[in-house]
Image (spheres, rainbow, N blue to C red):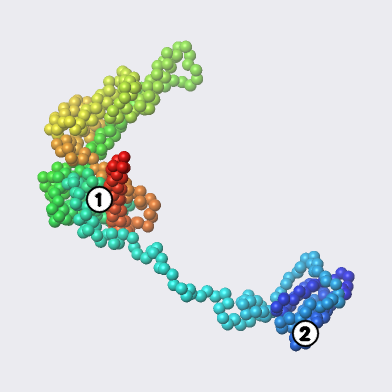
């Protein structure tokens, strides 16, 4: 039995193992419980005893397997622990199964023999992972100048587009078939290109074309100064077309800058009105200032009408209303109409050059306007009219610009491609993919046509 005010602790031995545990508490143990156990004839008795002490409660049990039958009745009724606030518990020692070994005990035993909790290698070897097994594009890069070029040049149109692309410290010079939209060659430089670099690259590419019996009939570039001299030496006598889009872009920008300067001059003339409601004497001047300010606002809102190619009837009416009383603004629109008329496919290059000469003489009569429209007097505008004598020569370099846009789009998602070898491999891989996609589209189109013919025959 237990004394009043004592802390009772019921001990439940493990069903298979018994251990030795030392527990230190801040209160004295004043109770002793002994539970006799009935055992078989050939088993070892399992007894539990408690020894009262001043501050230590010690329990012990035999470390033998308990196979005895449960007692018919206990000497004392079962009790349950009631702990108001447990104090510090210190583990003094332990000896359990081999798999319970731990190095964090106060008195650790030796490390168990065996593979308890260890990681072993798999006896059955699986398939090798393909991720990272080889560098991407390495095989594609080796076949660009041989197998790939042989396949692509079978449908060579004879018209090229050349352009450079800047990506940080690197520069990529590309040559694309301007009618088939297929990249033919490229060069990755780790610096800004020079005229010598472009000339050497084009000479190597011209040698590959000559070895395969291909002839160049026209070349289109932007307004860069890297290409005219190199093209004249490597491809003598081949028409050089400057991209129409780049030339019109420069002229359009000059027209808009001139319009902005005129609008600022117009706003400077508007008289400033004092704050507050105008008096009767200033009402007329205030209404005039508001009209002038509204015209400047409309001029800024409809500035795109001065450079747009085709205008609808409603847009023409809006432009006529905005430029009422401003003949210099109507002159800007007339000059832009003349520029668009130069690139009409229905006339020849000689006719277009005569029109350009007349336009330049007209612009020179306006001193300030002539300085602002300097792109009208550049030699690039004359070279941009070369395509009028050849119906198959593209007027723009859209084919190579499309390749550059695809490269920039890939660089946004592939951050590891930032070295010259990786850029070369990535472009080579993209070239092979583009060729395969073209073949897949052709095969799909052929199958669709065959199915349509078969359906018509069944009908």
Residue 211, given in percent of the width and then of the height, sits at 13, 56
Give whichever of 268, 439 is nearer the camera.
439
> What residue sits 24% from the left and 60% below the top?
143
Of the numbered discs 2 and 1, the one sitting upstream in the chain is 2
Q: Few, some or many C-alpha atoms within 10 Å of disc 1 (few <14, some 14-19, many ≥20)?
A: many
Residue that protrudes farthest toward the left in the picture: 237
Horizontally, residue 408 falls left or right of residue 379, namely: right
How far is the residue under mark 2 from the one under mark 1?
A: 93 Å
Residue 348, given in percent of the width and then of the height, sits at 14, 33
| Residue denoted by label 1 | 183
Tag 2's secondary structure? loop
Tag 1's secondary structure? strand
Vertical relation: 309 (above or below) 163: above
| Residue 250: quarter of image | top left
Give whichever of 116, 293 is nearer the camera.
116
| Residue denoted by label 2 | 40
């Amino acid at each position: 039995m237990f004394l009043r005010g004592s802390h009772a602790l019921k001990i439940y031995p493990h069903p298979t193992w018994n251990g030795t545990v030392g527990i230190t508490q801040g209160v004295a143990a004043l109770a002793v419980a002994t539970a006799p156990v009935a055992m078989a004839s050939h088993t070892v008795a399992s007894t539990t005893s408690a020894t009262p002490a001043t501050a230590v409660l010690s329990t012990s049990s035999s470390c033998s397997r308990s196979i005895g039958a449960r007692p018919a009745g206990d000497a004392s009724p079962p009790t349950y622990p009631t702990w108001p606030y447990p104090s510090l518990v210190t583990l003094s020692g332990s000896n359990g199964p081999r798999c319970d070994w731990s190095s964090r005990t106060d008195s650790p035993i030796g490390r168990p023999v065996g593979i308890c909790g260890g990681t072993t290698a798999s006896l059955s070897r699986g398939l090798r992972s393909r991720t990272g097994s080889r560098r991407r594009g390495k095989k594609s890069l080796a076949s660009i100048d041989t197998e790939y070029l042989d396949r692509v040049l079978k449908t060579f149109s004879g018209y090229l587009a050349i352009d450079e692309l800047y990506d940080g410290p690197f520069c990529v010079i590309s040559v694309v078939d301007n009618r088939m939209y297929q990249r033919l060659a490229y060069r990755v430089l780790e610096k800004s290109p020079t005229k010598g670099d472009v000339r050497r690259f084009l000479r190597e590419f011209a040698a590959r074309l000559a070895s395969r019996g291909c002839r160049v009939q026209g070349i289109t570039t932007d307004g860069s100064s890297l290409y005219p001299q190199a093209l004249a030496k490597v491809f003598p006598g081949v028409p050089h077309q400057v991209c129409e889009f780049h030339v019109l872009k420069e002229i359009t920008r000059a027209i808009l800058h001139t319009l902005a300067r005129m609008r600022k001059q117009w706003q400077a003339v508007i008289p400033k009105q004092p704050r507050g409601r105008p008096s009767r004497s200033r009402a007329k001047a205030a209404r005039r200032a508001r009209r002038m300010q509204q015209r400047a606002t409309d001029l800024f809102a409809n500035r795109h009408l001065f450079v747009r190619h085709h205008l609808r009837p409603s847009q023409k009416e809006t432009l006529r209303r905005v430029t009422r009383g401003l003949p210099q603004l109507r002159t800007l629109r007339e000059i832009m109409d003349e520029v668009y008329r130069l690139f009409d496919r229905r006339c020849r290059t000689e006719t277009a050059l005569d029109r350009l000469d007349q336009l330049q003489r007209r612009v020179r009569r306006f001193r300030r306007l002539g300085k602002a429209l300097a792109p009208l007097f550049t030699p690039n505008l004359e070279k941009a009219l070369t395509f009028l004598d050849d119906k198959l020569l593209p007027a723009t370099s859209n084919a190579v610009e499309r390749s550059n846009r695809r490269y920039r789009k890939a660089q946004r998602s592939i951050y590891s491609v930032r070295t010259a070898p990786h850029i070369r491999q990535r472009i080579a891989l993209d070239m092979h993919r583009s060729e395969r996609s073209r073949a897949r589209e052709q095969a799909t189109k052929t199958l669709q046509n065959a199915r349509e013919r078969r359906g018509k025959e069944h009908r």
